Structure formats: structure tokens, C-alpha cells
Image (cartoon, rainbow, N blue to C red):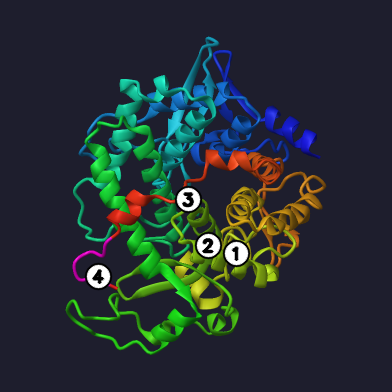
């Protein structure tokens, strides 16, 4: 099965001027291609890890070089143009009538709902850091062009803004969950990826660069904020249950004015004693209590989660295995939004019906993050269990994009087959579980600088 998966991944490669530059999103000849014939930056991140773990660095280097040329370097004030520093959501190789090739980039102007990607630049930094770890090609990353590209990405999220939180403000549908799902504001998935990209950027910038001090300060504040205010376990749930509201000043305990009545009924029984997790979102008067897998698993791998928090997340997954893993790893979020909430939050999105697609669907590509978190926390048995569950179905089902149902028993109603990041996610999980050294490509050690910089913002002391 592993050999066949590698062959399927090789079959997805896109060539440009005779060189491999990426992988298509899916190779399903039985469904409309839409934009699945393009190379998505976030999708290729998983493919890149697979290639690097196999020792194939050329395709990753070519991808980095080509996408850097697509990055928007011009400062723009008008609408409908990609802002300075934005990385494309995807690109495709176009063959003109006179047999010439050129690359066409999409910054969201052709995407469903026309939402620009927040996460593409972050994933690009993840890929670049993994490439350097695998190849030791520091001459590439220290070139003027790459240093400029890194700084432009940082400028997008570190420059002047309306916000005073260290988290990053984003609109709905601007990352992997690319449809309206009530994840506007400060969604965990983006905050965890933001943290990872900042740590990557700090390693990739030249040691003397003035940006490093700015990055370190933001890293410390971001880590404190997420570890303190996004974390939920039974003890903290009891505290929220007794919150007083409308508090003012620096002595306020309920700093975000969360109303206890917003605690959902499902959570009161679902949250186990040995376990905890980072909530899906936090903002003024709002706590999204849903469990989002990518953000929680990435928090473990990146060392954003403290050691005790990391083990609590893995305890939660172990105890609630049927809810989060079921018949296919792993739920993108839990639980699904249903009824009137589904109508108002998703806009009656027929693709995001309860327990489907981004609304509680199971996404096997996330297997790579689950395996990495299992390796990081020395809970490798959970990684192997999940891999075994996935292996029993993925090849037989032709590598679907996602699965439907409360326990992931059904192949997604509109899922593409031979989805590339499903294939790559399986391979990366397999490689990480069988060779812990591969974890170095995506993992980070405990960071004394981040710990030293971690401090509450004024009025936010815990």
C-alpha cells in the first residue's frame, strides 16, 4: 500500500519547463476538476514533507522558487488586487496556443466566495523551513530575494493594525476551512499556524536582522495568550460556569465577558476529566467551544502547547476516540453545527450539512499531524492505531478527500478521489511513526526565548 501511495503521489506532480514544481490537488478523472487541477500552497505543504522525507528535495526547491516569483511585492491601495506580501492560494501551469508555458496564480479572485487566503504565506514558511532542515541549503534562504519574501509575509501580520490582541484577526473562509463556518475573528487553526510560521521565520532570517526582535516579542505574547485564554479543561469549565459578567478594569476575571449561558449542553458531558484542549475561537463576548483538530495537533507539534497541555489533548483524543477518530482519522472539528445554527452560521451551505465536509467531516490528510503529535508526546500507540484505521479503507476507497457521518463511515458526498494531500498525509504519518528523526522537519524544541518573552498584555494578567 505504501508503494502504491508513493506512485499515486508521483502521478500528481506538475511540471513546468521540464522541472517538477508542485502537485495537483486531486487526480480524479470522474469529477469536474474546478480548481483541483491546480497546486495549492497549503496542500503542497503535506506533499513537500513526504518528498523531503524520501530525500527528494528538487521539487520542493523548485516550488519555493516559483511561488516566490508569484508573491505580490507591490504596495497597493485599491481593491481586487493582492496586497503586498500575499502568497497565492494556488497556481496552475497554462499552455498557450503557441505551445508556450506560463504559470497563472490565484490569490482568491477565482475561489468560491472570492476569499483571499490568510494561510498561504504561513504554509510557505513551513515548507521553506522544512526544506532547509532537510537540505541544509542556507544559501537559498539567505539570498536577498528569499529574505525579502519572508519579511513581506511578516509585514502582512505584524504591521500597524486596529487590533490589540497578539492573535491574528481573519475573516471567515480564509484558510483550510474555506467556507462560511463561523470561524471569523481569531480561529485557533490560524493562530497555531501563525505561531509555527513565526518560529520558522525566526530561524530563517539572518541572525542580525532587526525583524527577529519583533518576531520574538510577538511569539511570547501570542504563546501566553493562547496558553492562558484558549485552554479549556474541566477545572476551567467550572470557572467559566460561575463567571460574573460586565466586569471592568484590570482586576476583571472574565476578561472577554463570556456569558456562562453560552456553555453548550454537549460539552458538559463530553469533556472528560483526564483531558483538555484549545477552544476553536475566542473574542469579545464569544468563546467557540468546538474542538478543531488541526490547531490542537499543531499546538502540540510546535511546542505551543505546554507539556501538560499536550498530554491532555492526547488524553482527550484517546478517551473520545469514537467521536474524533471513528472509522477514519480525524474530525476536522467537533461537533457539527446543526438546525437553526447551521442555517444562520453557514448560510444554508448544502456542502457543509451536519457531519459533512468542514462541518464535522473526517479528513484523512490530518493523519500526518496526529502521527506527529503522537510521536512528540511519546503516545505512538495512538498514531499506529489511527494509521491502521486509515489503512483499512483509504486505498480501497481510492484516497478520498473527506468522509461524512458522525463516525466517518461514508465517503464524502462530493469528495474527490485520489486527493493528493490524503495520499501525502498517509505517507508522512507512516514515515514519522517509523522514523522519529523526520519529526525534526516540522517540530520545534522547547523555546527559552519564547518562555522569557511570554507576558500578559496590559489589563490581561491571568
Whether residues under marks 4 and 3 lie with C-beta atoms below 8 angstroms apart, the answer is no
Query: Which badge, 2 or 3, comes first in the chain's sequence?
Result: 3
Q: Quote the CA–CA distance across marks 4 and 3.
A: 24 Å
Q: Which residue is mark 1?
A: 314
Q: Quote the CA–CA distance across marks 2 and 1.
A: 6 Å
Compared to 364, does 360 lie above or below? Answer: below
Q: Residues within 10 Å of mark 3 (few under 14, many from 20)?
A: many
| Res 460 label | 4
In this picture, which residue range is highlighted in magenta?
A: 455-461
Q: Viewer-proximal residue, 443 or 144? A: 443
Mark in front: 4 vs 2? 2
Q: Where residue 292 appears, x then y in whole percent?
A: 52, 62
Compared to 44, does 145 lie above or below? Answer: above
Residue at screen point 25% across, 32% down = 209
* 456 is within the stretch colored magenta: yes
Q: Viewer-proximal residue, 242 or 354? A: 242
The quarter of the picture where the C terminus appears is bottom left
Query: Which badge, 4 or 1, comes first in the chain's sequence?
Result: 1
Residue at screen point 60% across, 70% down = 316
Q: Where residue 378 appears, x then y in whole percent?
A: 63, 56
Q: Residues within 10 Å of mark 2 (few under 14, many from 20)?
A: many
Q: Quote the CA–CA distance across marks 2 and 3.
A: 10 Å
Q: Secondary structure at mark 2?
A: helix
Q: Where residue 36 appears, x then y in whole percent?
A: 59, 38
Q: Which residue is mark 3?
A: 302
Q: Secondary structure at mark 4?
A: loop
Q: Residues within 10 Å of mark 4 (few under 14, many from 20)?
A: some
Whether residues under marks 2 and 1 lie with C-beta atoms below 8 angstroms apart, the answer is yes
Total number of numbered discs in the rendering: 4
Q: Secondary structure at mark 1?
A: helix
Q: Which residue is mark 2?
A: 310
Amino acid at each position: 500500500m505504501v508503494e502504491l501511495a508513493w506512485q499515486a503521489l508521483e502521478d500528481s506532480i506538475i511540471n513546468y519547463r521540464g522541472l517538477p514544481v508542485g502537485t495537483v490537488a486531486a487526480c480524479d478523472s470522474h469529477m469536474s476538476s474546478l480548481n483541483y487541477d491546480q497546486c495549492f500552497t497549503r496542500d503542497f505543504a503535506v506533499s513537500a514533507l513526504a518528498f523531503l522525507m524520501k530525500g527528494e528535495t528538487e521539487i520542493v526547491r523548485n516550488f519555493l522558487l516559483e511561488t516566490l516569483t508569484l508573491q505580490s511585492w507591490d504596495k497597493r491601495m485599491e481593491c481586487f488586487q493582492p496586497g503586498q506580501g500575499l502568497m497565492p492560494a494556488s497556481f496552475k501551469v497554462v499552455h498557450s496556443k503557441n505551445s508556450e508555458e506560463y504559470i497563472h496564480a490565484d490569490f482568491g479572485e477565482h475561489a468560491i466566495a472570492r476569499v483571499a487566503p490568510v494561510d498561504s504565506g504561513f504554509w510557505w514558511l513551513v515548507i521553506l523551513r522544512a526544506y532547509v532542515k532537510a537540505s541544509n541549503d542556507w544559501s537559498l534562504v539567505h539570498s536577498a530575494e528569499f529574505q525579502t519574501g519572508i519579511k513581506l509575509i511578516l509585514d502582512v501580520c505584524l504591521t500597524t493594525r486596529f487590533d490589540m490582541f497578539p492573535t491574528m484577526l481573519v475573516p471567515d473562509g480564509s484558510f483550510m476551512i474555506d467556507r462560511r463556518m463561523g470561524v471569523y475573528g481569531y480561529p485557533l487553526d490560524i493562530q497555531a499556524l501563525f505561531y509555527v510560521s513565526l518560529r520558522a521565520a525566526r530561524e530563517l532570517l539572518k541572525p542580525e536582522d532587526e525583524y527577529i526582535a519583533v518576531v520574538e516579542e510577538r511569539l511570547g505574547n501570542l504563546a501566553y495568550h493562547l496558553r492562558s485564554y484558549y485552554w479549556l479543561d474541566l477545572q476551567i469549565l467550572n470557572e467559566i460556569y460561575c463567571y460574573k459578567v460586565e466586569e471592568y478594569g484590570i482586576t476583571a476575571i472574565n476578561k472577554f465577558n463570556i456569558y456562562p449561558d453560552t456553555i453548550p449542553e454537549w460539552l458538559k458531558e463530553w469533556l472528560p476529566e483526564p483531558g483538555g484542549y484549545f477552544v476553536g475561537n475566542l473574542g469579545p463576548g464569544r468563546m467557540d467551544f468546538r474542538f478543531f483538530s488541526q490547531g490542537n495537533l499543531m499546538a502540540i507539534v510546535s511546542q505551543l502547547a505546554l507539556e501538560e497541555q499536550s498530554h491532555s489533548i492526547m488524553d482527550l483524543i484517546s478517551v473520545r476516540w469514537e467521536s474524533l477518530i471513528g472509522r477514519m482519522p480525524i474530525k476536522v472539528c467537533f461537533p457539527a453545527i446543526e438546525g437553526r445554527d447551521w442555517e444562520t452560521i453557514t448560510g444554508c451551505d448544502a456542502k457543509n450539512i451536519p457531519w459533512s465536509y468542514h462541518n464535522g467531516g473526517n479528513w484523512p490528510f490530518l493523519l500526518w499531524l496526529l502521527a506527529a503529535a503522537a510521536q512528540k508526546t511519546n503516545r505512538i500507540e495512538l498514531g499506529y492505531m489511527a494509521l491502521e484505521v486509515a489503512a483499512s479503507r483509504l486505498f480501497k476507497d481510492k484516497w478520498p478527500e473527506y468522509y461524512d457521518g458522525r463516525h466517518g463511515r461514508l465517503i464524502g458526498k462530493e469528495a474527490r478521489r485520489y486527493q493528493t494531500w490524503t495520499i501525502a498525509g498517509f505517507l508522512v504519518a507512516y514515515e514519522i511513526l517509523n522514523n522519529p528523526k523526520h519529526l525534526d522537519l516540522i517540530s520545534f524544541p522547547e523555546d527559552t526565548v519564547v518562555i522569557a518573552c511570554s507576558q500578559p498584555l496590559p489589563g490581561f494578567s491571568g
